[in-house]
Amino acid sequence: MAMLEINNLDKSFGKRKAVDDLSFSVREGEVFGLLGPNGAGKSTTLSLISGLQRPNKGRVTVGGINVGEDSLRAKALIGVVPQEPAIYPQLSARANLRFWGELNGLSKKELASAVERALTIVGLTDRADERCSKLSGGMKRRLNIAAGLIHSPKLLIMDEPTVGVDPQSRHHILETVKELKAQGTTIIYTSHYVEEVEQLCDRVAIMDHGKLLSIGTLPELLGQAGEYQELIITLRTTPESILPVIQALPWVQNAVVTNDVLAILTANAELALPQVFQTIVENELELAEIKINKPSLESLFLKLTGRTLRD
Amino acid sequence: MKKSLSIARVGFRQMFTDPMYMVFTLGMPLVMTWAMSFLPKVEGVYEMASLGVLVMFVALNLITSASAVIEEKQNGTWQRILCSPTSYSAVMGGYFIKLFVVAWVQALILLLSGKFLFGAPWNSGYAELAVVLTVYIFSMTGLGLFLASILKTQSQVQAVATGVVMVGTMLGDVFFPMENPSGIIKLIATISPQAWAAHALRDIMTTGAGLVPLIVPMLWMIGTGAVLLTAGVWRIKLDR
């Protein structure tokens, strides 16, 4: 059964189309990854699902309830974990969770156990009564997650929950997602980090410019990537002029530069690499690092959009 | 209603754990009320000044407190509230209760301290005073929410609040009696809810005026409050 169905969704801000005729569904109990670079339309899609914004066209159904027609009932099924911690810094972690529980309709009786449960899941029981302003950035993010799952939502929306966190908190957050998945929670997970999506998600949708480019399980998507490999070449400096030269080389399907990192999509790394090297030497560029990635979501994304996910 | 009360309660906790807020809303007006107690208590001079302090600080408090909506938008809690199964009217109801209660608590503390600590000669007219204050707080809550809906940052709110309140009180015949004001000053005194409130409160405390002669100022304050509140609530809803 589908926990979430999105049909022909459109959302524009002025002349800019943020979401363009988007349709997909998420099955009950699955972790669904939404991949795309900044400006791909992921956050707007999440806002439309959570009822924060209204679409110009199309329909969102959560647990069989049309969000546009009965938003309060639909919202009761949804938990939201925004990208930046949306908590009250002056209040304690426990007071924050009590508040978010009350707003999500928990009774006094349910509230105490729900708060303890959420604190335990995110590992903040021993810091529960401290002011949030005193918690570390990673702890705030964990509390942010706890606030999203305080009412045990059927559908949990997590918008890049690991951005900017320390490795320990990141590990904890990923473990939390796995635990929630094991408990049967349906999760929509957006991230820039392909490895997180590959590790957690049952199915993945790739978006860019508001459109759905591809959707499927990881093996299905990697199948679409075919034999394409990704050469990641880090240079000390990367002049703009090098890009068209690289793009014109035989065996190079596409290439982009982001912060002195040259990402090259190729069907044959062995044949492409010597030519790329030669170009680098001819242009007197200094090489810092080189990596060959096997077919991945990153290389599929490069193939589909001509952009890297971190663009 | 339960959810509105939760929103209001969180608002109180945020405010009362902020020492700067307490200094600004209670410390400063208390010092000014105390200073005004040295004025001669004849011909309404004292009433005019001490009630002027009350009118001015209640307005400043309401406008700056209403800007909490802007702060909530910036830190994402506003969006999170709207993602919860809480109706928009319950959300705004919570903010309204919060503003109304904090303004009343502030006004009550200033009035009681004036009477019991600083020797204000007030012995009657409490019911009328309560009605006029309620109406005034309503109109200023409307102004506060309207400003919160059109401004983008806290510093903008502080600048506009200072401007609106200072102009409304200083040129609105709140602290100093103005003989035959004309032009822009007359206009400000005519439209400023602070001016209407200050005059009504002073009439109650000095001449024992009842509510009937104060119908016009009260209707004006209710009208401006209702228009600004409606516009503010509508604009805040649009700007998600």
Image (cartoon, coloured by chain):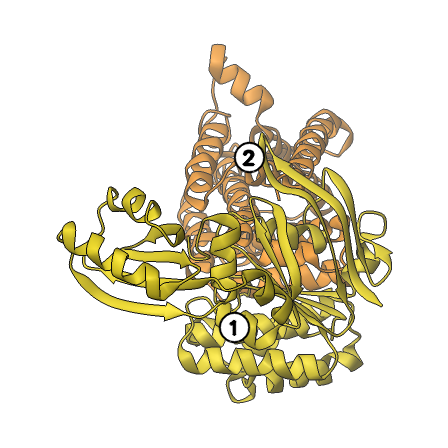
Chain colours: A yellow, B orange
Between A136 and B140, the one lying in front of the other is A136
Image position of A126 with respect to B223: above or below: below
Mark number, residue A10: none
User: Who's the residue at 80% across and 47% down the image?
Assistant: A68
Asked where in the image residue B239 lies, by quadrant, the reply is top right
Chain of the residue that carries numbered disc 2 in the rendered image:
B
Label at residue B150: 2
User: What secondary structure is marked by label 1?
Assistant: helix
The quadrant in which the C terminus of chain B is found is: top right
Judged left or right of residue B235, residue B169 is left
Please indicate, yes or no, whether residue A253 appears anywhere in the rendered image: yes
Q: Amino acid at mark 2?
A: Ile
Query: The residue under label 1 is which amino acid type?
Result: Glu
Instruction: Kindly state the secondary structure of the residue where label 2 is placed.
Output: helix
What residue is shown with label 1?
Answer: A196
Q: Position of residue B40 (x, y in %)?
A: 44, 39
Q: Which percent across, then down, holds residue A215? A: 66, 59
> Can residue B119 be seen by looking at this rendering?
no
